[in-house]
Image (cartoon, rainbow, N blue to C red):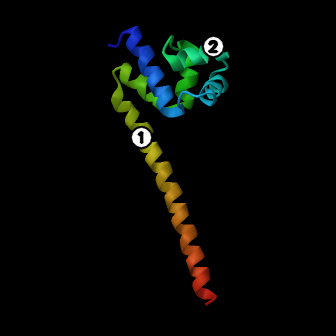
Amino acid sequence: MATEAEYILAIRDALRGELGGSRAATKMIMRWTGTCDRTARNWLSGAAGPSGYHLVRLARESDAVLGIVLTLSGRPELSLSTDIHAVEVALAKASGALERLKRQQFRQQRFR
């Protein structure tokens, strides 16, 4: 079981890893959660961590935060489903790109 300090640092690291530590990251967190600038900056700096409603809003938008919540909850195996979904999305995008390239190559060969 993680301490509160470990929780705060884990959330900070997850947010920074996904968004960076810039002003744009602060604005994104504000958009995701409806919090004020100071609150978002506190989460990014590790001065405080989100709780309750705001944690759920972050986990909804951030795979990194969701993974941390599952890990700190002692349920890391559940984060596998988010990894599988990410792979499925990447494969679908790659498959679409491959099909577009095939069609493009076919058109080029037809007009030679």
- In the shown orientation, is residue 87 left or right of residue 34? left
Q: Of helix, strand and loop, which one carries label 2?
A: helix
- Name the residue: 49% across, 28% down: 16
Q: Position of residue 56 (x, y in %)?
A: 54, 21
- Work out which quarter of the rendered image holds the N terminus and state it: top left
Q: Mark 1 highlights which residue?
A: 83
Q: Is residue 32 visible?
A: yes
Q: CA distance from mark 2 to mark 1?
A: 32 Å
Q: Of helix, strand and loop, which one carries label 1?
A: helix
Q: Position of residue 77 (x, y in %)?
A: 34, 31
Characterize the local packing of mark 2: few (<14), some (14-19) or many (20 or more) Cα atoms within 10 angstroms: few
**Amino acid type for the residue under numbered disc 1:** Asp
- In the shown orientation, is residue 75 left or right of residue 101? left
Q: Mark 2 highlights which residue?
A: 38
- Name the residue: 67% across, 15% down: 36
Mark 2 or mark 1: name the one nearer the start of the chain. Answer: 2
- Name the residue: 40% across, 10% down: 5
Characterize the local packing of mark 1: few (<14), some (14-19) or many (20 or more) Cα atoms within 10 angstroms: few
Q: Position of residue 103 (x, y in %)?
A: 58, 74
Q: Position of residue 74 (x, y in %)?
A: 33, 21
